[in-house]
Image (cartoon, rainbow, N blue to C red):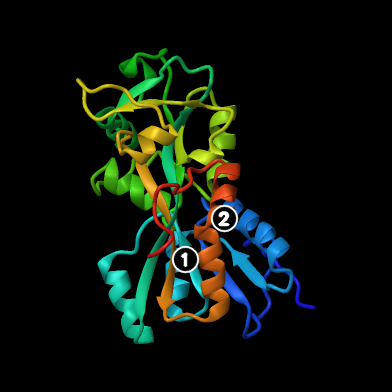
Amino acid sequence: MARLSILVAGLVLAPVARADTVTIKGSDTMLVLAQQWMEHYRREHPTAVLQLTGGGSETGIAALTNGTTDIAAASRPMTDAEVARAEARHDRRIVQIPVAYDALAIVVNEANPVDVLTLSDLARVFRGEVQDWKELGGSTAPIAIYGRDHSSGSWTFFRRQVLHDDDFSVDALNLVGTASIVDSVAKDVNGIGYGGIAYAGGLKHVRLAKDAGGTPVAATVESVRNGTYPLARRLWLHVTEPHDEDVARFLAWVRGPAGQGVVAGVGFFPLQTEGAGW
């Protein structure tokens, strides 16, 4: 009988996949979610064989393009250029499937008095133009910036949505995985970082305003779904089409009630009102 294999990048090297194995690679933000999907899926499909590795959204998309994974997990959509390369490589259509809502949470240490920032404030912090919390209404103390590595979809999303493709501060410490950011900010009273909402427990979530006169908005199910939270986003599974029956069955399950129940249980936001088709 086939068994379920859950292989986490950096811990175990995945063996060469069997022909009928469904492979998933990519987003570290989605790693815990994908692990839970796989564990729950096996309860309903005990002969299913799935393999999972992280490495970041960019890594997953590259693997999909190269033909070394069935599914790319990503915290961002593919770019037009990425789609074109993958479709040219496989001579098949790329399908981008939304599977959950997420909020890129801006987190600070619980001892930090700052609880509201505008997007402009945030940009100036992460570009290194504001270097002391006093300038943002906090105590006099240097700001310590924690961010993701360049292969991360969260890094790309933040750079595009907040910095408008400008460069991050040279003082920003780029870490592998959102959990590392959360751990660093929890230990650093002067720290600030960002990451998927499911990882940001135990820290203060900064409310965000689009501009100086705007209403600060917290990341909630409602504000993420209706788009009023400025850093709302969706999480994706990217695949080539057509794909085999094992992949199709897993994708349908993820988008169905059982898979979306796992989304809520992990701490992301389920699609809920969106249809099951794509």
Foreground of the two, 151 or 238: 238
Question: Please, is residue 164 above or below residue 86 in the view?
Answer: above
Q: Nearer the viewer, residue 61 or 99?
A: 99
Q: Which residue is mark 1?
A: 59
Please tell me in which quadrant of the rendered image residue 82 appears. bottom left
Q: Position of residue 148 (x, y in %)?
A: 46, 47
x then y, percent, for residue 39: 69, 58
**Whole-number angstrom distance, CA of label 2 to CA of label 1:** 24 Å
Residue topped by disc 2:
259
Q: Nearer the viewer, residue 78 or 191?
A: 78
> Where the C terminus falls, by quadrant?
bottom left
At horizontal 51% and vertical 66% (from top left) the residue drawn is 251
- At x 28%, y 44%, the residue is 161
Kind of residue indicated by mark 1: Thr
Give me the residue at 45% from left, 52% from top: 149
Most extreme residue toward the right, as rendered? 1
Disc 2 residue type (three-letter): Gly
Expressed as whole percent of the image width and height from the top left, the position of residue 211 reads: 21, 27
In the picture shown, does residue 257 fall above or below 269? below
7 vs 98, left or right, is: right
Mark 1 packing: few (<14 Cα in 10 Å), some, or many (20+)?
many
Element type at marker 2? Answer: helix
Q: Can residue 81 be seen in this snapshot?
A: yes
Tell me, yes or no, if residue 145 can be seen here. no
Q: Is residue 78 left or right of residue 107?
A: left
The one nearer the camera, 181 or 23, is 23
Residue 198 lies, in percent from the top left, at 54, 40
